[in-house]
Image (cartoon, rainbow, N blue to C red):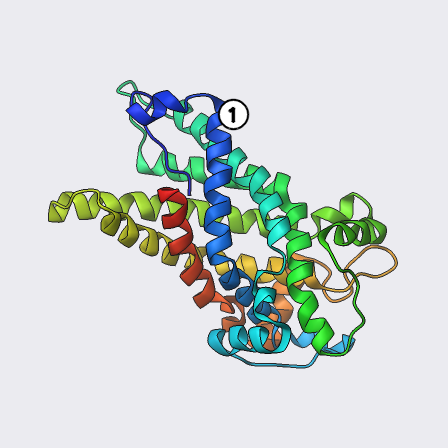
Amino acid sequence: MPVLRNADHPAAKKTDSIAARYFVAVLGSWAAEAATYPFDLTKTRLQIQSEVAATKHGYQLENHGMIKTAVGIAKQEGVLKLWTGLMPMFQRHAIYSGSRLIFYEYFRSYFKDEKGKVSLGAASMGGLAAGSLAQLIASPTDLVKVQMQAEGRRLLQGKPARFSNCRQVYVMLYAQGGLKGFWRGAVPNVQRAALVNMGDLAAYDFTKQYLVREFGLAETPLVHGAAAFTAGFVAAVMGTPADVIKTRLMNQPVGPDGRGTLYRGMIDCLQQSVRNEGILSLYKGFLPLWMRLGPWALINWIF
């Protein structure tokens, strides 16, 4: 979540260039990502568990909870495997977090009224637009991350290793689908980013203002923490279904034509998931996603 200050704020005077703001946004997101990344890996593994459509490719059905999944990864693959895919995530934030902040500031400036204020609705729409644009640009790095996160599960099921590092994943994906193939799953990925950013920004701002206004609290870390966890919950509720679909589209095997072999597209993935596994399948990984978004926002803000 970008933490934005007014132009006349003392701290803004020191970092008022676009390059400085971009760099600080990326640095803050890296710190938050390194601290909370195991939740993201656990979420991805939960989302591809019991994926009925994948059984035709030899995947076994599983049904583990968040803790059992995380502990299983640590025991069977090693504790450091909980950070598998962190490098493409850093690459993602080098594009996404900096771009999102600059885009959001531009949209916020555009929607200012004559008094220099921006309504909550306009801020939410600005967050939606900024998150969508930034995610569209950074989507290939998400695809690489999902592939690396799911690889450990494939190896445990006796599948041959496909790569050993981040660079090899990029080479593999290019060989499978060319440049266009890097944007597999981009539509639900952009939708997820739009919903998460809209819910995140609106809920964070509303909760913080409510606590300060109704209870007379100062803007302490406790207030920001409460606002961050509330925003994380709203963002997780709004974004998890699109996140599940995005993960499954990105993780599915690819045929010789560069197309996925399990799903024809976003709608087909949605229909198969609901028909085969029930409506709650769209909320697989909800808990680790929520548990990650709150601390992520708080660490990012503090940093």
Q: Which residue is mark 1?
A: 19
Name the quarter where the C terminus is drawn: top left
In the rendered image, residue 105, in percent from the top left (x then y), is placed at: 43, 28
In percent of the image, x 85 and y 51: which residue is there? 175
In the rendered image, residue 95, in percent from the top left (x then y), is placed at: 59, 38
Note whether residue 130 is visible: no
In percent of the image, x 33 and y 56: which residue is there? 229
On screen, residue 118 versus residue 168, left or right, reads: left
Circle 1 residues within 10 Å: few <14, some 14–19, many ≥20 = few
In percent of the image, x 69 and y 62: which residue is there? 251
On screen, residue 30 versus residue 152, left or right, reads: left
Note whether residue 107 is visible: yes
In this view, the residue farthest toward the right is: 256
From this view, report whether residue 43 is shown above or below residue 69. Answer: above
Name the quarter where the N terminus is drawn: top left
In percent of the image, x 64 and y 70: which residue is there? 272
In the rendered image, residue 98, in percent from the top left (x then y), is placed at: 52, 35
Badge 1 marks a residue whose secondary structure is: helix
On screen, residue 290 versus residue 247, left or right, reads: left
From this view, report whether residue 128 is shown above or below residue 222. Answer: above
Question: Label 1 sits on what residue type?
Answer: Ala
Please name whichever residue, 265 or 43, is drawn nearer the observer in this view of the structure: 43
In the rendered image, residue 149, in percent from the top left (x then y), is placed at: 64, 62
On screen, residue 94 versus residue 147, left or right, reads: left
Please name whichever residue, 114 or 254, is drawn nearer the observer in this view of the structure: 254
- The count of marks equals 1
Quarter of the image holding residue 198? top left
In this view, the residue farthest toward the top is: 114
